[in-house]
Amino acid sequence: MIKINNLTKKFGSHTSLDSINCEFNKNEAIALMGANGAGKTTLIRSILGYYHPDMGSVTIDGLDPIKDRVKVLEQISFVPQLPPPIKLNIHELMQYISIGAKVDRELIMHYANEMKLDIKANMYKSFFKLSGGMKQKMLIAISLAKKSDIIIYDEPTANLDPKARDDFYRLLKQNEDEKILLFVTHRLEEVEELVNRQIYMDFGQIVSDKRGEPK
C-alpha cells in the first residue's frame, strides 16, 4: 500500500534520506526505530506529503502524496509527538473533524471515553489549554474514529500514564485488522506485543528490517 522507491531527501549538504527502498502493506504493524537524526521523521513527513523528494518517489495506493494530497490524507491518521497548538475548544474541534474529515462525532466520544478522557467535562475548554496527556488521548480518539487504512503514531505514549498506555494498546489490538500501523518509537518494549515488523534506521538508511509475529 505504501511504496518507497529510491527515496532521497537532502537539506543543504545534509542527506536525511539516502536512497530508501521499502514497502508497507496491510496487516503490518511496524516499529520504526533509530537514533535522533536517523531519518525517521523525514520518512514520515515524506509519506504525508510534507516534503518533496530530491530523488525517488513515495506512492500510497498508487497515489502521489504531494500531487494527490487530499486523497492520500483521507486514508491516513497521524498523531504527532508534539500535539499541534489548536485554539479550538473540544466541541469546535469535533465539529471541524466531523465535517472536514467525515468522522463520526459519537465515535470520537466513544474512543475518548475508552481512553478515560472526560469529554463532557472539558467540552468547551480550548484544546491548547488541556494537559499533555489529555491532548494525546483526544488525538488518539480521533485517529481511531477516523477508521483510516494507515495510522501513524510518532512516540504516541510520551504523555500517557501507564493505565492510559494499556487502554491505548487494547484499543489498537481491536482495530488493527486490514490496516498499516506505523509506530515511530524509541521504546520497542512498549510496542513489542503489537508489531510484526521492526525497522531500524541510521544515517538516512534502513540498516535492519525484521519480520516476525508479535510477542
Image (cartoon, rainbow, N blue to C red):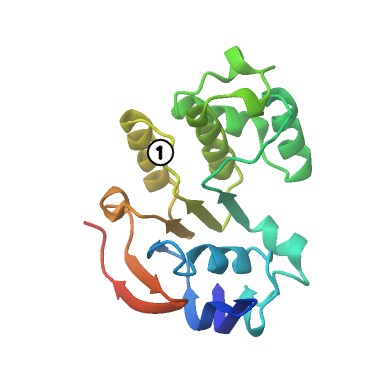
**Residue 170 in the image, given as x and y percentages of width and height:** 35, 40
Question: Closer to the camera, 26 or 125?
Answer: 125
Q: Which residue is identified by label 1? A: 168
**Residue 6 in the image, given as x and y percentages of width and height:** 55, 87
From what the image shows, is residue 21 above or below residue 117? Answer: below
**Residue 175 in the image, given as x and y percentages of width and height:** 45, 47
Residue that protrudes farthest toward the left in the picture: 215
- Which residue shows up at 57% across the image and 38% down it? 139
Q: Amino acid at mark 1?
A: Phe
- Which residue shows up at 50% across the image and 33% down it? 137
Around disc 1, counting alpha carbons within 10 Å, would you say few (fewer than 14), some (14 to 19), or many (20 or more)? many
On screen, residue 51 versus residue 168, left or right, reads right
Residue that protrudes farthest toward the front in the picture: 13
Image quadrant containing the N terminus: bottom right
Question: Closer to the camera, 193 or 41?
Answer: 41
Quadrant of residue 32 within the rendered picture: bottom left
Question: Closer to the camera, 115 or 145?
Answer: 115
Helix, strand or loop for disc 1: helix
- Which residue shows up at 67% across the image and 82% down it? 54
Quadrant of residue 45 within the rendered picture: bottom right
From what the image shows, is residue 9 above or below residue 174? Answer: below
Question: Closer to the camera, 161 or 193?
Answer: 161
Image quadrant containing the C terminus: bottom left
- Which residue shows up at 52% across the image and 18% down it? 118
From what the image shows, is residue 125 above or below residue 182? Answer: above
Is residue 174 in view? yes
